[in-house]
Structure formats: structure tokens, C-alpha cells
Amino acid sequence: MTLKKNVLVTGGAGYIGSHTCIELLNSGYGVVVFDNFSNSYPETIRRIEKITGKSVILFRGDIRDQKSLEYSLERFGCSIVLHFAGLKAVSDSILRPLEYYDINVMGTLTLLRAMQAKGVEALVFSSSATVYGEPCTLPLTEDHSLTAINPYGRTKLIIEDMLRDFQASSPLMRIAILRYFNPVGAHESGLIGENPLGVPNNLMPIVAQVAVGLREVVNIWGSDYPTPDGTGIRDYIHVVDLAQGHLRALEVLERSEGLTVNLGTGVGYSVLEVIKAFSVASGRAIPYVLAPRRPGDVAVCFADPSRATTLLKWKAQRDLAAMCADTWRFQQANPKGLS
């Protein structure tokens, strides 16, 4: 396989970044991971290399350090950036908003300055469906109003606006903005998966930890939503499908000035439906308790992914059963996570 361009992957040791690194390496790209391991482990890099049989260049650094970013871009000849680095929990952002603005917004601003200084003109940005806020209509299209209702979502929206302004001022700049819905699942090898430090903020790793015996129950935050079973409904997408969407976006940027697309399945599942599906996949009962709603959560959210299908020639392939089975495989093989 002919080696393609080198790609700088910020946050490449994280959950989505690590799975995307596998897709990049398997497609012939050179991968340079830029990560400070604030919510990930160096072991993930070793496992990426084991899965692919290929080497990863690792630079340990903070996204707010412009000199380190410039050095990495120049030293390793990176002509494209995939930007995953940042904080990502809605509830945590309400408690620590300034840290989210500092790392997510200022970190991205620093990255753009480094790219500008080194003449790097292609960026794929990890955005979020939280930029839509409370849905006015469903499914959510890319033309829906942007009214983020929590600090995490607002950081993503500020960054999107910044990227649009930057691209307008720099005609050669090519930017893909990918709005994720709810990434879940793990690589089919069971070697990498969602591996948060401390208490998980997302549903699936909590369910998996209950199934494996690390936690006693799943707290369901809100059982009085206007949904069929009273629990929140989300569009869950397998992380490998998501990673492949990034690869397609990167390839499209080679011949396009930019795009903004949803990456989701177009299907919503409730919290109780996810717990039931995981119980089937694991063969274990998943105890849960009903708790009050959390601030910043919406009742229902799912994507219209048709623009991604048209522009990227991409469509999610894996269903909820596969998402649960792959998560369970990773959790069983790594009951206490990576270290």
C-alpha cells in the first residue's frame, strides 16, 4: 500500500480518536498522535499498533501549546489535522464551564494559529449534536437552528463559528465539521473501547461496568420525559462507523472546500431500550434506579444523516445489538479498563 499523507490527530489516544487512527493507518495514512493523556492512556497507542501492525508517531503535548503544535506539524510533515482534543461531558461542563472554554475554545484557537503559521490548510473537526440545543423538529438536519443549551455545546458552537469565519478569510482553507450524535461500541478486537478515567459520563460505559460488576446500578437520569417509556431517547452510533465517517470526510476534503454534516444513524433508542439490549448481549441482568433529570439534557435527539450519505457516500452499518456486543467484548477483556 502506498503511504498517503501524514495526519496530525489531536486527542488521538481518546475514544473516538483512537478508533479513527486505526482507520487511517489501515487506509495508508501516516498518523501522528498529539495528546496529553488527560483522559486516556499511552497503552491505547500500543494497542492501535497491535491491531494495525503499523507504527504511530506520538507527541505528548497540550492543545494550548502553540509551539508544540507547530513543531509537530513541521517535524512530521503533517498536511491535515483531525481535531478531537477537548473536554466532552455535558454535566461536567455545567460545573466547570471556564475549563471547557479554556481547553475547547482556546485550544482550538491555538491549533488554528499553529496551522496558519505552518501552512496546513485541511482540518476535520469533532463537533457535536449538542449545537442544536432543544430540537424544534426531528430528525435533526444540518439546517436546524443552532441554540446550544449547555456550556459543552456552546464551546462546540463557538468553535464552529470560529472555523466558518476563519475559512471565509482564508480561501485555501478546507474544513469539515462533523456533528456526532452518541458514540458507543468498541473495536471488534476487544483491544480498545471507551475507557474513561474516573466515573463515566456516558450511558454505555456505565451499563457495561454494571454488567461486569464494577458498579451496582445504572442511574437513569429522568423517567418523566415525553417519550414512550419516559426515558431520554438518543441516536447511538457505533464508534467504528463514526471513525469511518472521518476517513470519508478527510478524503472528500481532498477535492472540496469544506462541509458540515451529521454523523448518526437516524434511529433513536431510549435509555431503557439500551439497557435491555445490553442485558441480552451480556447475558446478565442490569439493575437500574430512576433518578431526577439532569440539567442540560434534552428529551429526544436523533439525526437526519442523509447529507452525509450524499456528500461522503457514508452510512452507519452497525445496529444497537452490535454496539452492545462490541462494548461487552471490550469490557470483559478489560474489566478495569486500560492503564
Image: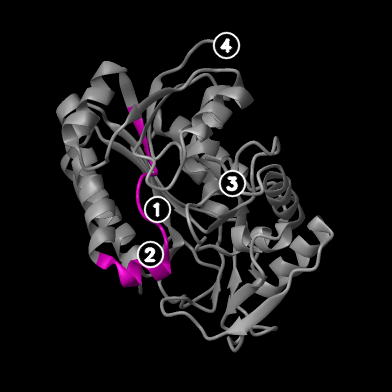
Give, as a three-letter code, the residue at label 3: Gly
Mark closest to the chain's N terminus, 2 or 3: 2
- Circle 2/circle 4 CB separation < 8 Å: no
Mark closest to the chain's N terminus, 2 or 4: 4
| Residue 323 x, y percent position in the rendering | 69, 52
Residue at 50 percent of width and 18 percent of height: 55
Instruction: Please tell me whether mark 3 or mark 4 is closer to you in this view.
Output: 3
- Which mark, residue 1? 4
Separation (CA) of disc 3 from disc 4: 33 Å
- Which mark, residue 165? none
Give, as a three-letter code, the residue at label 4: Met
- Circle 1/circle 2 CB separation < 8 Å: yes
Give the residues drawn in magenta, as a range: 80-97
Separation (CA) of disc 1 from disc 2: 8 Å
- Circle 4/circle 1 CB separation < 8 Å: no
Q: Is residue 165 left or right of residue 247?
A: left
Give, as a three-letter code, the residue at label 2: Val
Name above or below for residue 21 compared with residue 322: above
- Which mark, residue 127? 1
**Frontmost residue, 131 versus 288:** 288
Residue at 52 percent of width and 60 percent of height: 200
Give, as a three-letter code, the residue at label 1: Ser
Q: Rate crowding at label 4 as few (under 14), some (14 to 19) or many (20 or more) other CA atoms within 10 Å.
A: few
**What residue sits right under mark 2 in the picture?**
131
- What element does badge 3 sit on? loop
In the rendered image, which quarter is residue 59 located in? top left
| Residue 240 x, y percent position in the rendering | 61, 42
**Frontmost residue, 293 versus 177:** 293
| Residue 184 x, y percent position in the rendering | 60, 53
Q: Is there any visible trace of residue 147 in the rendered image? A: no
Residue 96 forms part of the magenta stretch: yes
- Which mark, residue 337? 3
